[in-house]
């Protein structure tokens, strides 16, 4: 996190505690407010899966999901890395891959 980003969160936290001194500050909610996940992301993932299904009719849906999940997880991981989120990279990659595989 850069000093400018940290300064922004200090300002948000100060404004929060000025209005709601008894409520805890939700850092994650603030982070998502200023760095939201693109709302079309799920549409892009779905388009990728449909494309793979149409263009690889010999592959089962399970195989397509197994092959596609690491790619999608890598894209999410790269985005997180570029935004310098404080997560351990390898662990996060496997968590995202598992999440994708368990929800499709």
Image: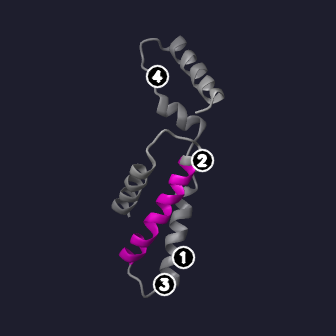
Distance (Cα) linking label 4 and label 3: 48 Å
Assess whether residue 85 is covered by the magenta stretch. Answer: no
Going 38% across and 81% down the picture, which residue do you hit? 60
* SS at mark 4 in the image: loop
Assess whether residue 71 is covered by the magenta stretch. Answer: yes
Rendered location of residue 14, percent (x, y): 56, 15
Rendered location of residue 16, percent (x, y): 53, 18
Type of secondary structure dominating the magenta stretch:
helix
Rendered location of residue 3, percent (x, y): 63, 27
Distance (Cα) linking label 4 and label 1: 43 Å
Locate the C terminus and report the quarter of the image it occupies: bottom left
Residue under numbered circle 2: 82
Going 42% across and 49% down the picture, which residue do you hit? 92
Numbered circle sitting on residue 25 = 4
* Closer to the eye: label 2 or 4: 2
Q: Which quadrant of the figure has residue 43?
A: bottom right
Determine whether, in the image, residue 47 is placed left or right of residue 69. Answer: right
Numbered circle sitting on residue 75 = none
- Magenta highlight range: 61-80
Of the numbered discs 3 and 1, the one sitting upstream in the chain is 1
Of the numbered discs 2 and 4, the one sitting upstream in the chain is 4
Of the numbered discs 1 and 2, the one sitting upstream in the chain is 1
């Amino acid at each position: 996190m850069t000093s400018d980003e940290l300064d922004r969160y200090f300002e948000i936290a100060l404004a929060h505690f000025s209005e709601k001194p008894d409520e805890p500050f939700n850092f994650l909610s603030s982070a998502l407010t200023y760095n939201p996940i693109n709302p079309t992301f799920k549409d892009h993932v779905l388009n990728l899966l449909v494309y793979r299904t149409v263009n690889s009719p010999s592959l089962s849906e399970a195989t397509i999901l197994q092959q596609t999940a690491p790619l999608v997880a890598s894209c999410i991981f790269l985005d997180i890395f570029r935004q310098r989120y404080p997560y351990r990279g390898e662990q996060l990659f496997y968590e995202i891959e598992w999440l994708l595989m368990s929800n499709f």
